[in-house]
Image: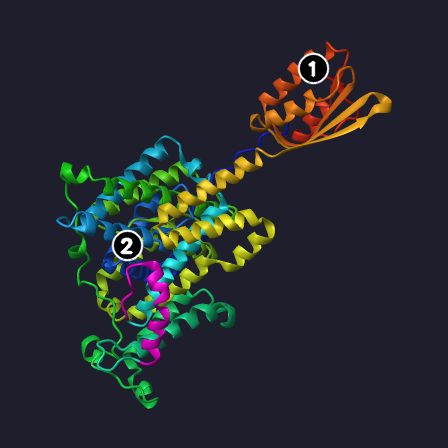
């Protein structure tokens, strides 16, 4: 047996160079996180402050506690669907109670579930999800985001249902190209800003000089959108575009802007101590379990991806789960959005050269300072630009190239991907994930129930060969029992196991029991135990068989 790998030495203390690297990386992560925090909150139908507070908690609290030092936490596009669905269900099922209060309670309980799971060391188990299910989940979320945010991109209102939103996209495009007269929103101008933002997101890194690549494309897209909205009126009029009455409402060329309060403290709405009636609501507990499961799986899978991109300390999954639980508990109490580890911000952190957890912590500080000291700048951002960022994010989550590659590697895995995504779009996120997990389990069951038994007779040598291929488990025990019982008595029976992927105790017990009975007929049973052992342990297989 190989010796266990030596433990990694502890990370060296921060040096001046490390501090500078973390400081610069934190600025980059801050610039990536700011528009996403605002956009995700608006996509959920909540004030921008709800997303910013989650980003602040993800940096200043989770950044200190995280088990994955270079991962960055905050509001995630993957949870938009869950939040929207929860708020809609709360309005329908509990009309007398604030949906935001119920959401905060569900998020707080989800955080407590994560803390408990971390203390009980359940962290690694949240990673035990088929990659096809995870990719299908992200694809379903991506389609849902596109169905909702494409309408926001043209300053229109999205239908409630995802499928209705997808079917209504041509109508939204019609508003952009041929806006209705007297409309209270400038659909064409919003569409132009959204299109510019998408083009910048797609082309920024491929075309700009290397020294400018450190500037996040999302920041450039937002800055261009602000400039066009504020100063683009003469250009639009020169092209014959009529600036409608929405310009008098929203300012600039009339594209709707982010609505943000002058004080972050005023936007914090603690949920207070809930009544027992509210605590007993099934809606709250179902939401809490869903938030805890989805957020934990997304966080820990993101941590695995982060580990693959650097050579520093590996993730402590239980500690990361506990840190996320603390963060979500706080977010629930103050009425903010749920959080996860986020791959977009984490990748930006690594690419910007972060060395320690200080980068993630500082990014939370910059978010807090910016929204506290400069809220008027945030109020200049056109909502269409944030919607464009989310539409682009949804398209990346859809990951069609990944689906094509998965189809080449395993058609069954690709079908699990598609079934998960379709169920999410047509039903809801939890149903889609459950569907994917069930299909993955069924696939595993089929694989572990496939056993092929091939018989070859050598009558001139009074010998019979049985070749077993696949997985020899108790599920296929009747097949093997039938095959060996059909062998005539008094012969040499050679059972070849070297092509098996798995063999369990029930099969081995069957063979040993049959051997005793078969020898009573004057026959002999031969099994190459050494080759079987070598097959599963990677040793060079010795030749020859041994009698059972």
Q: Residues within 10 Å of mark 2 (few under 14, many from 20)?
A: some
Q: For the N terminus, which image quadrant?
A: top right
Which residue is tagged 1?
A: 515
Dominant SS type (magenta): helix
Q: How crowded is mark 1: few (under 14 residues within 10 Å), some or many (20 or more)?
A: some
On screen, residue 385 versus residue 306, left or right, reads left
Q: Disc 2 versus disc 1: distance between alpha carbons? A: 63 Å
On screen, residue 237 versus residue 12, left or right, reads left
Decide whether residue 359 is among the magenta residues.
no
Please tell me whether residue 532 is drawn above or below residue 441 in the rendered image: above
Image disc number at residue 538: none
Across and down, in percent, residue 335 comes to 21, 50
Q: Which of marks 2 and 1 is nearer the N terminus?
A: 2
Which residue is more in the foreground, 512 or 39? 512
Q: Which callout, 2 or 1, points to the residue nearer the camera?
A: 1
Across and down, in percent, residue 378 comes to 26, 66
Per the image, label 1 sits on a secondary structure element best described as: helix
Per the image, label 2 sits on a secondary structure element best described as: helix
Magenta residues, as a range? 156-178
Name the residue at 36% across, 49% down: 429
Q: Tell me how many marks there are.
A: 2
Name the residue at 44% across, 49% down: 420
The image quarter in which residue 29 lies: bottom left
Please tell me whether residue 363 is drawn above or below residue 62 in the rendered image: below
Which residue is tagged 2?
A: 84
Across and down, in percent, residue 167 comes to 36, 66
């Amino acid at each position: 047996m190989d010796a266990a790998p030596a433990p990694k030495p502890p990370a060296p203390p921060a040096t001046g160079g490390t501090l500078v690297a973390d400081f610069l990386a934190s600025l980059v992560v801050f610039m990536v996180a700011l528009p996403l925090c605002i956009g995700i909150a608006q996509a959920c139908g909540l004030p921008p402050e709800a997303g910013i507070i989650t980003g602040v908690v993800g940096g200043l609290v989770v950044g200190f506690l995280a088990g994955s030092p270079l991962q960055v936490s905050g509001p995630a596009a993957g949870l938009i669907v869950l939040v929207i669905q929860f708020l809609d269900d709360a309005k329908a099922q509990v009309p007398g109670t604030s949906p935001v209060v119920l959401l905060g309670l569900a998020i707080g309980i989800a955080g407590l579930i994560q803390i408990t799971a971390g203390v009980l060391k359940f962290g690694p188990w949240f990673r035990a999800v088929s990659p096809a299910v995870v990719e299908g989940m992200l694809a379903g979320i991506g389609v849902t985001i596109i169905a909702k945010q494409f309408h926001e991109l043209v300053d229109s209102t999205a239908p409630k249902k995802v499928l209705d939103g997808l079917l209504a996209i041509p109508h939204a495009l019609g508003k952009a190209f041929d806006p209705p007269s007297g409309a209270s929103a400038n659909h064409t101008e919003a569409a132009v800003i959204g299109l510019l933002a998408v083009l910048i997101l797609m082309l920024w890194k491929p075309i700009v000089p290397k020294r400018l690549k450190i500037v996040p494309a999302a920041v450039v897209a937002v800055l261009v959108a602000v400039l066009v909205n504020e100063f683009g009126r003469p250009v639009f009029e020169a092209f014959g575009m009529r600036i409608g009455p929405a310009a008098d409402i929203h300012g600039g060329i009339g594209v709707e802007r982010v609505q943000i309060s002058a004080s972050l403290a005023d936007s914090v709405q603690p949920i207070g101590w809930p009544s027992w009636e509210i605590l007993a609501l099934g809606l709250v507990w179902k939401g809490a379990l869903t938030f805890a499961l989805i957020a934990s799986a997304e966080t820990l899978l993101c941590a695995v991806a982060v580990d693959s991109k650097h050579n520093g300390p590996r993730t402590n999954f239980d500690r990361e789960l506990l840190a996320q639980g603390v963060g979500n508990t706080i977010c629930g109490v103050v009425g903010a959005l749920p959080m996860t580890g986020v791959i977009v911000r984490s990748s930006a952190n690594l690419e910007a050269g972060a060395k320690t957890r200080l980068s993630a912590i500082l990014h939370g500080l910059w978010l807090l300072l910016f929204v506290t000291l400069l809220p008027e700048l945030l109020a200049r951002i056109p909502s269409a630009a944030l919607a464009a960022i989310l539409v682009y994010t949804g398209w990346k989550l859809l990951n069609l190239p990944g689906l094509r590659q998965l189809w080449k590697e395993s058609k069954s895995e690709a079908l699990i991907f598609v079934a998960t995504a379709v169920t999410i779009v047509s039903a809801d996120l939890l149903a889609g994930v459950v569907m994917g997990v069930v299909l993955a389990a069924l696939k595993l069951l089929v694989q572990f129930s496939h056993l092929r038994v091939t018989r070859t007779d050598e009558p001139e040598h009074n010998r019979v060969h049985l070749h077993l291929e696949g997985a020899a488990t108790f599920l296929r025990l009747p097949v093997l029992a039938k095959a060996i019982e059909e062998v005539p008595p008094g012969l040499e029976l050679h059972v070849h196991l070297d092509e098996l992927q798995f063999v369990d105790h029930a099969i081995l017990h069957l063979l040993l029991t049959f051997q005793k009975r078969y020898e009573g007929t004057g026959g002999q049973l031969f099994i190459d135990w050494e080759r079987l052992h070598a097959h599963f342990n990677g040793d060079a297989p010795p030749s020859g068989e041994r009698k059972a």
